[in-house]
Image (cartoon, grey):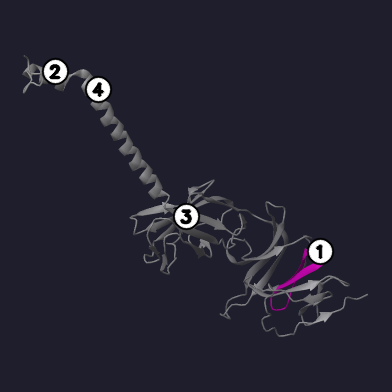
C-alpha cells in the first residue's frame, strides 16, 4: 500500500514548485500592489503635510497711486498638529514680488517683521505690514503680483501663500496743482520749491478716490501722500494759506462734506465733517492769509482728526448773500 503522505518530495518536484511560472506571477502582482499602495500613502502624507499650514495674503485695496503706502496682511492658519513659533528669526517672513513689465521686483531692504508669537494647532493669526513699498520698489505704475513666504523652523521648511495678491499701481488724474516755497534751516540757501498735487483715481467699483501729494516740481521725489477718501463731485474747493498748509473741502456723500488741512509733507493735520444743509461749505481767505471754512454745520464723526494748534482759531463764516 502506498503512503498517501510521503515524507519527502523528489528534488525535481520542489524545483518545479519554486519556479512554476503561475506561482511567481501571483507573488509578483501582490508585491507590486503593495509597493504602489505604499507610494500612494507617502504621496498622500506629503500632500497633507504641505497643506498643514495655510498662508493667505490680502490688502485693503487693489489699486494704489505711486508713493502711497501699500499695507498687506498675512494670515497664518496652523493645522500641523503642533505649536509653531514665529518671529524669532528676523528673516521668518519675506515676499516674492513680480511685475508685469519687470519680472522680479528689486528688494530694497530685508522685511522687518520682528515680534515673537506662538501659534497653537488649530488656530490662526494675522501679521500686518504697514507698507510693502518700504521693502520693494513699487513706486512705478505697473501691475504687481505678491506672494508671502513664511519660514517654519519646527517643520523644517517654508510655505508660500496659496493665492498671490494682485495690486495695480496707477498714475492718477491731476485735479489741481500749485508750487510753493519751503524755508530751509540754512539761511544762505534759497527756499526749496515743492508742489502740491490734488489727484483722483477711479476704483474697480466705480468709486472715485481723492489724494494729495507733496513732491518736488518734477514729481520724482515724493515727500508725502495722503488718501482723503471717496469724492462724489470731483470739483473740490482748494486753498493754500500763508504757512503753506493746504485746505480742501470735498463732498463724499449726499449733503456731507469733508474739510481737511494738510502740512507741506501731506500729513493730515485736521479732518472734520460738515452737513451741507443751507449754505454749502466752502473756503475763504482773510487779509492775513489765513484760510477758514464757510457755511455748513459741523458734524462730529469718528474719523475726525483733532486740529493741530493753529495760529488762528477755526471760525465758520456765513457765505455772502
Tell whether label 1 touches label 3 (CB within 8 Å): no
Crowding at dot 1, Cα within 10 Å, few <14 / some 14-19 / many 20+, comes out as few
Residue annotated with mark 3: 55
State which mark lies toward you, 3 or 4: 4
> Residue, x 21% and y 23% (percent of image)?
24
Identify the secondary structure beneath mark 1. Answer: loop
Residue 68 coordinates in the image, percent (x, y): 59, 62
- In the image, 39 versus 125, the foreground residue is 39
Does the magenta segment cover residue 251? yes
State which mark lies toward you, 4 or 1: 4
Q: Earlier in the sequence, mark 4 or mark 1?
A: 4
Residue annotated with mark 1: 254
User: Range of the magenta residues?
Assistant: 238-260
State which mark lies toward you, 3 or 1: 3
Residue annotated with mark 2: 16
> Distance of mark 4 from mark 1, alpha carbons?
83 Å
> Distance of mark 3 from mark 1, alpha carbons?
41 Å
Residue 238 in view (yes/no): no
Amino acid at each position: 500500500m502506498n503512503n498517501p503522505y510521503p515524507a519527502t518530495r523528489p528534488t525535481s518536484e520542489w524545483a518545479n514548485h519554486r519556479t512554476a511560472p503561475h506561482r511567481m506571477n501571483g507573488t509578483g502582482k501582490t508585491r507590486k500592489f503593495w509597493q504602489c499602495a505604499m507610494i500612494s500613502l507617502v504621496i498622500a502624507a506629503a500632500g497633507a503635510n504641505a497643506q498643514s499650514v495655510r498662508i493667505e495674503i490680502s490688502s485693503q485695496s487693489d489699486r494704489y497711486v505711486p508713493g502711497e503706502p501699500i499695507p498687506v496682511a498675512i494670515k497664518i492658519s496652523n493645522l500641523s498638529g503642533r505649536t509653531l513659533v514665529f518671529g524669532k528669526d528676523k528673516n521668518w517672513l519675506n515676499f516674492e514680488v513680480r511685475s508685469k513689465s519687470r519680472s522680479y521686483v528689486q528688494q530694497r531692504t530685508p522685511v522687518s517683521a520682528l515680534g515673537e508669537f506662538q501659534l497653537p494647532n488649530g488656530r490662526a493669526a494675522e501679521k500686518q505690514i504697514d507698507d510693502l513699498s518700504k521693502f520693494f520698489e513699487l513706486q512705478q505704475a505697473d501691475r504687481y503680483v505678491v506672494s508671502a513666504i513664511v519660514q517654519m523652523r519646527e517643520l523644517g521648511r517654508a510655505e508660500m501663500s496659496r493665492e498671490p495678491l494682485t495690486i495695480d499701481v496707477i498714475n492718477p488724474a491731476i485735479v489741481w496743482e500749485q508750487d510753493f516755497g519751503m524755508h530751509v534751516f540754512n539761511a544762505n540757501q534759497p527756499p526749496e520749491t515743492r508742489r502740491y498735487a490734488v489727484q483722483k483715481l477711479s476704483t474697480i467699483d466705480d468709486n472715485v478716490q481723492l489724494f494729495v501729494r507733496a513732491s518736488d516740481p518734477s514729481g520724482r521725489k515724493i515727500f508725502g501722500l495722503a488718501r482723503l477718501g471717496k469724492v462724489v463731485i470731483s470739483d473740490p474747493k482748494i486753498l493754500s494759506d500763508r504757512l503753506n498748509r493746504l485746505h480742501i473741502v470735498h463732498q463724499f456723500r449726499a449733503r456731507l462734506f469733508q474739510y481737511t488741512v494738510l502740512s507741506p509733507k501731506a500729513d493730515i493735520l485736521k479732518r472734520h465733517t460738515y452737513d451741507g444743509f443751507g449754505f454749502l461749505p466752502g473756503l475763504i481767505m482773510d487779509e492775513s492769509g489765513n484760510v477758514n471754512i464757510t457755511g455748513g454745520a459741523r458734524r462730529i464723526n469718528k474719523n475726525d482728526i483733532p486740529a493741530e494748534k493753529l495760529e488762528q482759531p477755526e471760525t465758520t463764516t456765513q457765505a455772502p448773500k
